[in-house]
Image (tube, helix red, strand yellow):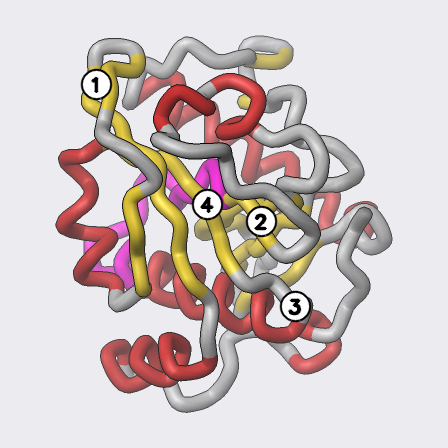
Amino acid sequence: MVAVVTAENRSAFAGTITQMHRDRKAVFVDALKWEIPVVDDAFEIDEYDTEAAVYLVAQEPLSGAHLGSVRLVCTAGPHLLGDKFAFLCADAVPTGDDVWEITRLCTTPGLTPAAALQVRMRLVMALMEYALAHGIARYTMMTHTAYLPTLLAVGWDIEPLGLPADVAGQPTGALQISVNAAALDRLRTLYGFRAPVIGASDARSAVAA
């Protein structure tokens, strides 16, 4: 299952969120060499990890250990694409209460390729489930163009927001993903999951404002 972690329930997931930040540092800073903030030389935490952030977190069923996660931020407030990478959009950056930004999607280091794929599949479906439960019409995100074929293979309805540009030496593009029930049905068929991956109580949990 995938847990929805908001400002309201974050204390119940304190250990898992701490591990998430440690794993993000291992993935994005140590492995990918991104020049982004690191706290106490151990945790990747930036200015968008606020009370407004919502995390979808895949956990190990027995221990609750972090297996993978993604951060969601409403674009009606501060967000990475609008604040720092608007030049990736040919027109205005999409914003609004029904447009949320996807960032920091990762799986914990050390998983087998098959296990990491299972985690990513659950997170992809969780993104659609959460959006449909909370009136989110579109997601925005940035990605290196080398990863674009993988994203297209996911089964999302993706539209580029502009031409790719160089970001820290990597061709990078901004995308928007349309949310609809048909897309979720396609994902469930593609991945072989008929039941929701977010628990019913989590799916209806209040969005952190």
Give how far across and how far down residue 126 sits, in percent: 50, 67
Determine the CA span between mark 3 and mark 2.
Answer: 10 Å
Circle 4 sits on which residue? 140
Three-letter amino acid code at the position of disc 1: Gln
Of callouts 3 and 2, the N-terminal one: 2
Q: Nearer the viewer, residue 101 or 36?
A: 101
Circle 1 sits on which residue? 170
Circle 2 sits on which residue? 100
Circle 3 sits on which residue? 135
Three-letter amino acid code at the position of disc 3: Gly
Q: Secondary structure at mark 1?
A: strand
Of callouts 2 and 4, the N-terminal one: 2
Is residue 43 visible in the rendered image? The answer is no
The residue range painted magenta reads: 102-118
Residue located at (24% from left, 15% from top)? 166
Question: Which of label 1 and label 3 is nearer to you?
Answer: 3
Determine whether label 2 and label 4 are within 8 Å by CB. Answer: yes
As for residue 116 lying within the magenta part, the answer is yes
Residue located at (64% from left, 35% from top)? 18
